[in-house]
Image (cartoon, helix red, strand yellow):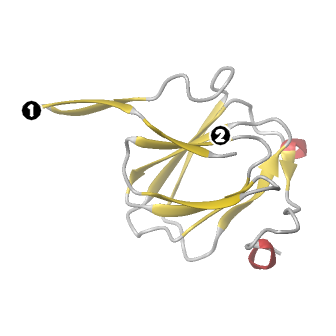
Amino acid sequence: MAKVHQLKTFSSEKGNLTIFENMIPGTIQRVFYIYGANDSPRAGHRHVKTWGALICVAGSCRVYTNDGHEEKTYHLNTPDQCLVLEPQDWHVMDNFTEDAILLVVANEPYDKADYISKPYPNTRFASVMA
């Protein structure tokens, strides 16, 4: 199941330094970010083997997750929080603020075959993503 982690942050009069390490298994294979998002939900899938780590480095967004047994909604609104998604976590991101930048770090390179778009039967966003 998805889990929010508080990232180590060191603050001084020079500003803040936040560290992302040991959040997902394996090595980082892919990094991308979402910005300028409109009102449409993003994602609407889970993975066969990819783990992901989501950090809203600016603004805020909402992330809905469902692992087939439990569903949960997270509000990411600070750059020192990291939401780790396991492969079985079907997820949807929405409610992006105009200034939102959502950074995503994954342990696998892009592979279309790794995506499972069919939601779990109890997924609230299933009709929205169809």
Which corner quadrant holds the C terminus? bottom right
Between 47 and 112, the one nearer to me in the picture:
47
Amino acid at the residue labelled 2: Gly
Q: Position of residue 86 (x, y in %)?
A: 72, 40
Question: How far, Cα to Cα, is label 2 from label 1?
Answer: 32 Å
Q: Secondary structure at mark 1?
A: loop
Q: Position of residue 67 (x, y in %)?
A: 77, 52
Left or right of 112 in this view: 43: left
The reply to whether residue 64 is in sight is: no
Which corner quadrant holds the N terminus? top right
Above or below: residue 85 compared with residue 71: above
Q: Which mark is residue 31?
A: none
The image quadrant of residue 117 is: bottom right
Amino acid at the residue labelled 1: Glu
* Other-residue count near label 2 (Cα within 10 Å), few / some / many at <14 / 14–19 / ≥20: many
Where is mark 1, residue-wise? 13
Q: Position of residue 113 (x, y in %)?
A: 90, 44
Residue under the point 80% across and 73% down: 126
Q: Which of disc 1 and disc 2 is earlier in sequence?
A: 1
Residue under the point 48% across and 65% down: 36
Q: Secondary structure at mark 2?
A: strand
